[in-house]
């Protein structure tokens, strides 16, 4: 096919796409105009039904909790995939990276970077835990909290402590935490079934005060498990990639 | 149907919110274009991180603070870290 023919095919296809795209856009509801009743119904009922003032979490972990199980397992499978692809193959041995351009001048980690990383690690761990354990009271949740916990590990690496990072996050422990997180969520759902309720039906006491940390039953518990799973997955993924960069593997 | 709507009064004048939202939309479009146009790899990753921050602020202005938190950590920190590590690995192989 000549470039000229190809250009014509592109122009015809592009014009067709543009027409259908604009046609589709013209049928959308106006900016900021929400047409459906579902969101309004949830806003009216969620706090009274779940005692969770974090309505986003109530939707994620209760009203459409089954959907979120799927999302959590997507991350679980992704982390498993990375760990499988980057595993140590038969006949490969790890050895620490040596500088292959020996005469090169390598600037040390600046003390400003080390300082900022070290100072912010503690507050970030605290914020991460707070977010993961307060899904029921504000718009946060296990996902956000878990990812923030994982960034704390990245900060430890940034402060120049690669070996410290490896000691803080042994792969066996990460695997276990990830499994507990993913399995815990599914187990809460199955527990409800065992009691003769629908899968993931909130079966724990909802508490007296809407918006209290102890309120909302399984919503808070599920968020906690999601936090464990997400933090472990991301630390595992970043750790595997760091290994690939900093440890050189050689066939024996 | 609209009788179900819950009206939350803005604490900020609507016109001000409009200006803020339009400004952020323009900034996000400019940021995304910059990510595509920058060809130097490390700079491109850094711009991607800046773009992540812009997107996070946009989500906040559109009243989705939960998405803001996810975007800040994933888009501005973890994705750039993963990409930088990959670049470091490739560079080592190229030498």
Image: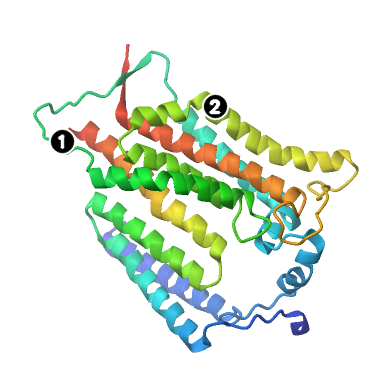
Disc 1 and disc 2 on one polypeptide chain: yes
Farthest residue, direction right? A196
| Image point (8%, 28%), residue name | A103
Please give the label number shown on residue A173: 2
- Residue A176 visible to the viewer: yes
Image color mode:
rainbow
Of helix, strand and loop, which one carries label 1?
Answer: loop
Q: Along the polypeptide, which appears first: circle 1 or circle 2?
A: 1
Horizontal and vertical percent for residue A198?
85, 48
Horizontal and vertical percent for residue A114?
29, 42
In which quadrant is the C terminus of chain A drawn?
top left
- Residue A147 visible to the viewer: no
Q: Quadrant of residue A28?
A: bottom right
Q: Which of A79/A185 is in front?
A: A185
Q: Specify the subunit that label 1 lies on.
A: A
Please give the label number shown on residue A106: 1
Report crowding for label 1: few under 14, some 14 to 19, many 20 or more residues within 10 A (C-alpha).
few
Q: Which of B51/A142 is in front?
A: A142
In which quadrant is the N terminus of chain A drawn?
bottom left
Report crowding for label 2: few under 14, some 14 to 19, many 20 or more residues within 10 A (C-alpha).
few
């Amino acid at each position: 096919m000549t470039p000229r023919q190809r250009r014509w095919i592109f122009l015809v296809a592009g014009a067709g796409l543009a027409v259908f795209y604009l046609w589709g856009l013209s049928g959308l509801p106006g900016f900021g105009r929400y047409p459906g009743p579902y969101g309004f119904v949830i806003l009216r009922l969620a706090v009274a039904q779940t005692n969770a003032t974090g309505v986003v979490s109530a939707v994620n972990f209760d009203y459409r909790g089954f959907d979120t199980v799927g999302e959590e397992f997507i991350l679980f499978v992704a982390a498993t995939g990375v760990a499988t692809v980057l595993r140590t193959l038969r006949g490969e041995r790890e050895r620490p990276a040596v500088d292959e351009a020996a005469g090169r001048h390598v600037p040390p980690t600046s003390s400003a970077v080390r300082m900022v990383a070290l100072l912010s690690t503690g507050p970030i761990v605290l914020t991460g835990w707070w977010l993961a354990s307060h899904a029921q009271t504000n718009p946060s949740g296990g996902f956000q909290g878990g990812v923030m916990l994982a960034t704390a590990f990245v900060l430890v690496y940034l402060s120049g402590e690669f070996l410290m990072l490896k000691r803080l996050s042994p792969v066996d422990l990460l695997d276990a935490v990830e499994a507990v997180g993913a399995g815990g969520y599914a187990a809460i759902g199955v527990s409800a079934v065992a009691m003769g309720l629908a899968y993931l039906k909130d079966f724990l006491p909802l508490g007296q005060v809407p918006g209290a940390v102890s309120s909302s039953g399984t919503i808070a518990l599920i968020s906690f498990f999601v936090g464990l799973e997400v933090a472990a997955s991301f630390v595992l993924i970043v750790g595997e990639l760091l290994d690939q960069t900093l440890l050189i593997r050689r066939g024996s | 149907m609209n009788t179900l709507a819950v009206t939350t009064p803005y604490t900020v004048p609507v016109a001000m919110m409009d200006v803020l939202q339009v400004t952020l939309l323009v900034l996000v479009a400019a940021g995304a274009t910059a990510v595509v146009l920058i060809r130097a790899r490390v700079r491109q990753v850094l711009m991607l991180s800046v773009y992540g921050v812009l997107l996070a602020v946009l989500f906040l202005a559109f009243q989705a603070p939960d998405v803001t938190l996810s975007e800040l950590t994933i888009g501005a920190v973890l994705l750039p870290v993963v990409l930088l590590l990959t670049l470091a690995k490739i560079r080592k192989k190229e030498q």
